[in-house]
Amino acid sequence: MCGIAGYIGKKNAAELLLKSIKNLEYRGYDSVGMVTLSEGKISMKKGRGKVSEVDSKVDFSSLPGTMGIAHTRWATHGKPSERNAHPHISASGKIAIVHNGIIENYLELKESLQEYEFKSETDSEILAHLIDKHYSGNLKDAVLKAIAQLNGTYAICVMHQDSRELVVARNGSPLALGIGEGENFIGSDVSAFVEHTKKVIYLEDFQVASIKENSVEIYDGKGNPVSMETKTIDWDVEKAQKQGYKHFMLKEIHEQPQVVRDSISIEIPELEKPRKIFIVACGTAGYAGLTGKYLLEKYTRIPVEVVYASEFRYSDPIICPGDLFIAISQSGETADTLAALRLAKEKGAKTLGIINVQESTIAREAGTVIYTRAGPEIGVASTKAFISQLVVLYKLAEKLSGTEISLTSIPDKIQGILNQEGKIQEIAKKYFRVYNFLYIGRNFNFPIALEGALKLKEISYIHAEGYASGEMKHGPIALVSDEVPTVAIAPRDSVYPKMVSNMQEIKARNGKVISVATEGDSEIPEHSTDTLYIPETREELYPLLTVIPLQLLAYYIADMRECDVDKPRNLAKSVTVE
Ligand code: AGP
């Protein structure tokens, strides 16, 4: 996800837009650019890096004019670079656009724009040329014609050097209009302009607006005028960046339905079937990898070994040419994972990175890279990156096995769980003073037990251990008491009866059980103290759902313990040291 901003009024556009994109930088920060219009001339500055880095080189404030657009990028198509930075200018040099979203059919559209010289590798640039192609004096009409050809998501802001107006459009990516006195503002969210105006119009999907300093005209996708309510908000910048959520982590948990939708369309490159697969990572990424083991072995029957990166790098691993080494990392900078990747390459293995941050070190050094589509993950505790990693692993299993694995129902099912947030909060209230937790799961949900325990311990500082459920009787059940609750992940799957037995053993020893169960399971409450329900799905898809209540449970317990949820003590978002 990227941040887009626009301004039209009487003030110095560049200075105002510079502040806007700084406030939007949490949405993406690999490159930044700005265009202003002055005396019928478009001027542009852009570069690779964070806003302040690029500004120190190009001095955005030197751009003249009282109208402009700006963008801070999170790369999806085309690596972070100056040429791929937005804004993009049309071939005529008269139209500038900034875009947030993913144009799924950009290659097909690019084919129809052969007469134009493309300067970047991005999907967004086609919009500049497409609008140019349709332009015959009315910018709004040209935008309407162009977006009618688009598949995918977009929030765009467009300007033409011959007219003092900004035209915006959205579908699937957010766009807010700030209504001022003799000036108007645009932002991916209100943090772009909330210090200037609290009057906001939230554009809806398929709407287009023509914005001048004293007017805002909104149209539907067919060009019919529509009237939209102007809301007054009481947010400050920080609250706006979190879109009203108390913490980035909670916002990112709630972004997961869209992250799954975005991730489903990730292209998996052609890969030779390997003799053996190694999945190597740390922390949550490692638990995504362990889930991947169950998936890949079920679908491809290729043996998969999952190893902590910190162990792999010092174990003199038996990895050979013809093996596939998969590094999973949100940041792409984790020192142990990077070292393990380098060792695997030395030993001749093919390497694949499943990475969230484009052009990060691991992304650049892996032989092949598949980028997850979680967008910037600000909370230290990984949630939406984890779910995007899982989606990539499902798609990898599908690619290597040739068996279709449909995930299209998952986003709505995740949303259904998120809608039960209040129930999860109630359960958190019963347990937030507890000092020890056990998490148990089997088969596909064993890695989710590990992940659920990690989520709780890293943000609430409660000691929590994840176990393979069958291991309980080999020691851990000695820990069970009425002061040590157990989270049991027990959806209706092939190991459900075994999970019920484990729960009965715990209850028989006065242990409390919080179960994660399939909606409609009327038996499970007999074996539980509290039950969190998730929608039914196929056995191998349950990890995408069972993790959600565990993320929320950890979040609410930590918040009730007044912990610093987004920045837990002793932790960093990226562990670049051993
Ligand atoms: C997860 O919530 C933690 N923040 C941590 O375990 C993290 O997953 C681990 O450090 C790996 O980070 P990476 O994905 O950036 O490599």
Image: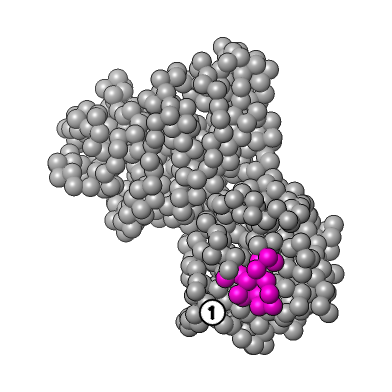
Tell me what residue is drawn at x 57 percent, y 33 percent.
269
Residue 418 point in image, percent of width and height:
36, 55
The three-letter amino acid code for the residue at tag 1 is: Ile
Residue 292 point in image, percent of width and height:
44, 30
Magenta run includes residue 138? yes
Query: Which element is circle 1 on?
Result: strand
Tell me what residue is drawn at x 82 percent, y 68 percent.
43
Residue 427 point in image, percent of width and height:
29, 52
Tell me what residue is drawn at x 18 percent, y 41 percent.
524
Secondary structure, magenta segment, majority class? helix
**Which stretch appears magenta?**
131-144
Q: Quadrant of the C terminus?
A: top right
Q: Quadrant of residue 397?
A: top left
Looking at the picture, does residue 404 appear above or below residue 102?
above
Horizontally, residue 349 falls left or right of residue 81, namely left
Q: Nearer the viewer, residue 198 or 471?
A: 198
Q: Which residue carries the number 1 mark?
A: 218
Q: Quadrant of residue 115?
A: bottom right
Label 1 beta carbon less than 8 Å to ligand 1: no
